[in-house]
Image: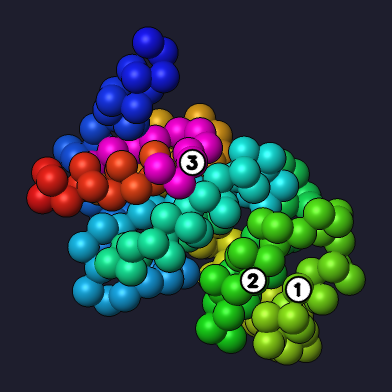
């Protein structure tokens, strides 16, 4: 009975009346992946050291690859301390080299501590230049800090208590989902649309 209920119960809570949610779904000013004509947008709040985020990442990835009419907007919310903050800053700097999605996926699957040598290796494997990252971390420090502060405000205004959180259409879902739950959420957005 519990399994049936979980598979048929609505995912998340309705935030369609929340202006912040509507602004986030337009995906402006944050790293994004997917087609410009996507009919479903997923805004994902994550931390690179969050175990549940790491569990959900490959599931979202598979659902995204199954359905090429979905766009993902990434919101780095480093709530697990200084190591998370450094990784999020590097990821946001990587967006200036147009390699954010590759860096994001690599950081989510990286099992080593996200220390500077590991971050450098991730950037270089993604085809980026570490010297450019270091320069952007300095030259664009205020913009990166502002992006992280904005994500904190958005999470607060949406009432998110931690990572991961997914804004999928009008639904805000907290906690890890599996591939089928992501696909069900995509269908629900289209059905409601």
The tag earlier along the polypeptide, 2 or 1, is: 2
| Residue 42 in which image quadrant | bottom left
Q: Residue at x 39, y 39 (%)?
A: 181
| Residue 137 in which image quadrant | bottom right
Q: Looking at the image, is 62 positioned above or below residue 125?
A: above
* Residue linked to disc 2: 103
* Numbered disc in front, either 3 or 2: 3
Q: Residue at x 32, y 31 (%)?
A: 11
The residue closer to the viewer here, 185 or 150, is 185
Mark pair 3, 2: CA separation: 22 Å
Magenta segment, which residues?
170-180
Label 1 secondary element: helix
The residue closer to the viewer here, 35 or 157, is 35
Mark pair 3, 1: CA separation: 26 Å
The tag earlier along the polypeptide, 3 or 2, is: 2
Disc 2, disc 1: CB below 8 Å?
Answer: yes
Q: Where is residue 44 drawn, in percent x and y?
A: 45, 51
Q: Where is residue 64 drawn, in percent x and y?
A: 41, 61
In this picture, residue 124 sits left or right of residue 17: right
Bin the neighbour count of mark 2 within 10 Å (Cα to Cα): few under 14, some 14-19, many 20 and up: many
The residue closer to the viewer here, 142 or 131, is 131
């Amino acid at each position: 009975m519990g399994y049936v209920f979980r598979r048929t119960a609505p995912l998340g809570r309705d935030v369609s009346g929340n202006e912040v949610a509507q602004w986030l779904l337009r995906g402006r000013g944050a790293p994004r992946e997917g087609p410009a004509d996507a009919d479903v947008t997923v805004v994902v709040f994550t931390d690179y050291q969050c175990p549940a985020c790491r569990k959900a990442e490959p599931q979202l990835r598979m659902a995204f690859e199954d359905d090429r009419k979905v766009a993902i907007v990434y919101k780095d919310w480093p709530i697990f301390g200084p190591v998370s903050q450094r990784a999020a800053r590097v990821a946001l700097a990587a967006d200036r080299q147009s390699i954010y999605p590759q860096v994001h996926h690599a950081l989510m699957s990286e099992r080593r501590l996200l220390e500077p040598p590991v971050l450098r290796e991730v950037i270089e494997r993604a085809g980026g230049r570490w010297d450019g990252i270091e320069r952007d971390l300095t030259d664009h420090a205020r913009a990166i800090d502002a992006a992280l502060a904005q994500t904190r405000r958005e999470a607060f205004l949406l009432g998110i208590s931690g990572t991961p959180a997914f804004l999928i259409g009008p639904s805000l879902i907290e906690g890890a989902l599996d591939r089928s739950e992501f696909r069900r959420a995509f269908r629900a957005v289209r059905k409601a649309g």
